[in-house]
Amino acid sequence: MSETTPSEYVTLVSNDGYEFKILRSAACIAGAIKKALDPLSGFRENAQSRVDLPTINGVILEKVCEYLYYNQKHVESKEVPDMDIPPELCLELLIAADYLDC
Amino acid sequence: MPLFRPQGLHGDDIDFENTWSIIASAFKEIHTKNASRLSYEELYRHAYRIVLKKKGEELYNRVHQFEQDWLGHEVRGSILSLFSPNLLADAQSLGSTTANERRVAGERFLKGLKQAWGDHQVCMSMLADVLMYMDRVYCQDNRRPSIYNAAMVLFQKEILQSATSDVAGRVVLGLLNHVILDQIQMERDGDVIDKHLIKSCVYMLGDLYEDELESDDQRLYTTSFEREYLETSRGFYRGEAELLLRDSDAGAYCKQARRRIYEEEERCKSTLLEVTMPKIQKVVEDELIKNRIREVVDMESGVRFMIDNDRLTELNLVYDLNSRVDDKKDEVTRAVQKRIVAMGADVNNAALAASQAPAAAAEAGDKAKGPAQDKGLNQQTVAAIKWVEDVLELKDKFDRIWSESFQSDILLQSALTRSFADFINSSAFPRSSEYISLFIDENMKKGIKGKTEMEIDMVLDKAITLLRYIQDKDLFERYYKKHLCRRLLMNKSVSNEVEKQMISKMKIELGNNFTVKLEAMFKDMAISEELTAGFKTHVEGLGEKDPKRIELGINVLTSMTWPLETMGGAGDDDEGRRSKCNFPPSIDRIKRGFEKYYNQKHSGRQLTWLANMGSADVKAVFPKVQQRDGSTKERRHDLNVSTYGMVILLLFNELPAEENLTFEEIQAQTNIPQNDLIRNLQSLAVAPKTRILIKEPMSKDVKPTDRFSFNEGFTGKFVKIKVGVVSSGNKVESDRERRETEKKNDASREYQIEAAVVRIMKQRKELLHQQLVMETLSQLAGKFKPEVNMIKKRIENLIEREYLERIDTAEMDSYRYLA
């Protein structure tokens, strides 16, 4: 188990090979990602600072990352502008959200 | 790149057994601390899909079974391997092992258990992470406990409740409790133990519950350990109290008790859970204090001993302990009050003994006060002053104890005050009012000479302090008036200022009513001074330049204000005191002159001359007569004598030398009351330094047949000679005098009671007997405490005089006011 301080950025990988480097704090808004990276548990994802998500494709994962940043940015504000969600992605985004717990 | 799986999350049916075996082997890896090889996402995805495929229940049960097996085989085994003969010996209370062996074995056991528990927690938290979706969807929908909680219960059941195989019925939990308690006992006995280790195990018990509902009162800590802990502690402290009471003194007991309370508090913080703190404190307090405080207080080395030896710290300990278990501090209060009353009674008895055995008291007084002791001071006065000083000393002592040991507790303050009042007003000691007044008197006359304002103030405050305790303020007023009267008329006061200061202090303490008459006395004195001066100028204005003129200084006293009846001297009946003394013509003339002058100013007032109170300065010339030293000089002396003395001496002016007068002749010519005459003749003819008259026969007593002549051969060292009248100083009353005073006091009380009753009835019109008595008592509380019997008699009397009537129709005794 690596004892080094956790890196600031982590990598999320989609099933079609796209890699998204995003802030660890933003990534951890998603429950499943947070637990995968939990240093106390010490799973492989933690050591590599990299989470493979073989059930999510690049398009959706990009939107997910956008949402994570969007959530982080607005977490304390009261009036939050709507996020632009293309209707054709809705279903897949919902499935991803359930899976990632975010 | 990880293995690419073309199917999505919601793809085809999955092979449960296959998937589970992947998960199960991963769990095994987690339990053996090989998690870094595993992909969380992969495991999570498997579990996610199983739940998604409605196999949640199966998954849950499998995990549950997996954990049960793991705990039951792997973990339990490792725990059982920790059992050693020493540990088990301890568990069976055989006592064949040393404390140290037991401690080592115990610590090993605790460490193993702590390790197992820690591992279990970490692994279960990882499992729960992996099974997050199951918890979120399956458990919530089916109201099952989260897998983490279920696993905690499993630990409880599989490990803590598993049999230890040594004693029938004993389980690991029981052994754990026992080991912890044993370690704590070692600490109580002075050993050092690994508090941190114990705390970890205690936390474990705090995190585990009897059942899956997890209600707060079902914590293992509360249901199992704490109960046993409190029970053994109770036993331990009961034994310790027994031992301490037998083997040590009260001070040591209190110290130990306080240390134990503190220790238990610390233990709750460092070793156990803080929720136990109030409970264990109650146990310690019950066993060491509540059940024992009475014994401790009454020990030979208890409160009495501490008070007598000024053990302020120990008293503070006792107080502190007592206040822990009892807001009212009953036991300490009781003991302290008892001591005050006992010590007060000692002071009272000493004063009584001193006053009843004058010789012994004189000796004691002389020793106490040294050679500077005023000879004229009556032994009884010494006793009085000693009493006051003793009481003040007692008061100081208890004040110090109160502020330093009892944290200035209000309840104890009032208890102390009550006890002081108790013994000061004790019926066995009726003299306190008189003694306090005498104390003030003594200080006014001599005590405050050469003292600074501050010191004087302190003396006055002391007197006020005692005055506060006095119940019968009216009696005190009577004595104070009497003493003040003597001081004023005989010019004995050192300072008029201080007198007034005292009055104003009393005014603050006892109210205006109390001092009104005292102030009137001062007013009379001031007016008298004016009158004297006025009369002097008046006489001078008459132009009568008589070289033999007699100067008159006069005090006109309002008879209601001044306690004249107490100044007449003992033994006078009314007629004797009122009888008029025959003044010599020269004096009589000036007396009439003043009466005339006074009547011009205030017509209609009657002046009564109290010759027994006055004094006169007489210039005496003793002729040239052969002296013992042979000289024949003429000697002039200024004699300061009482008015009676002056009247007697003037008789000899007109008498040819060598002639004499009998006692009866003097009495007939002067009409001085017999008692006063005897006393004055004693001081003129018997007292060695002022023997201006010669008495035949020479004896100490004056008899009606004695003859008196002028002592031409009189010599004195000083020009001015003061002829003191025998026994005119202030002193303690004799028993008879006091009965007299009390009788007079009772008479004035009767009026006050009647006045109070009438005031109350006038306002209330009708009242029950009981209520009337109560109200009367409360109205008079500031002045004195009347006896109920006296009130009853006064009410009867008022009925006879038709101020009140009984209400015949009423059930209870009640009265109606008759306007």
Image: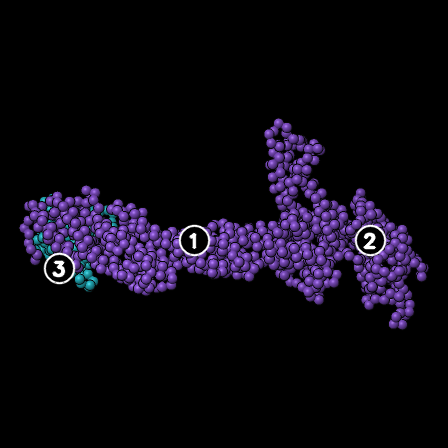
Chain colours: A cyan, B purple
Q: Which mark is residue B492?
A: none
Q: Nearer the viewer, residue B81 or B40?
A: B81
Q: Is residue B749 visible?
A: yes
Q: Nearer the viewer, residue B409 or B15?
A: B15
Q: Nearer the viewer, residue B66 or B676?
A: B66
Disc 3 secondary structure class:
helix
Q: Please count the marks in the image.
A: 3
In this view, B750 is above or below B353:
above
The answer as to whether the residues below labels 1 and 3 share one chain is: yes
Q: Nearer the viewer, residue A9 or B408?
A: B408
Subunit that carries the residue with mark 3: B
Name the amino acid, label 2: Asp
Name the amino acid, label 1: Glu
The answer as to whether the residues below labels 2 and 1 share one chain is: yes
- x and y percent of residue B404 in the render? 52, 59
Residue at which label 2 appears? B676
Name the amino acid, label 3: Arg
Residue at which label 3 appears? B37
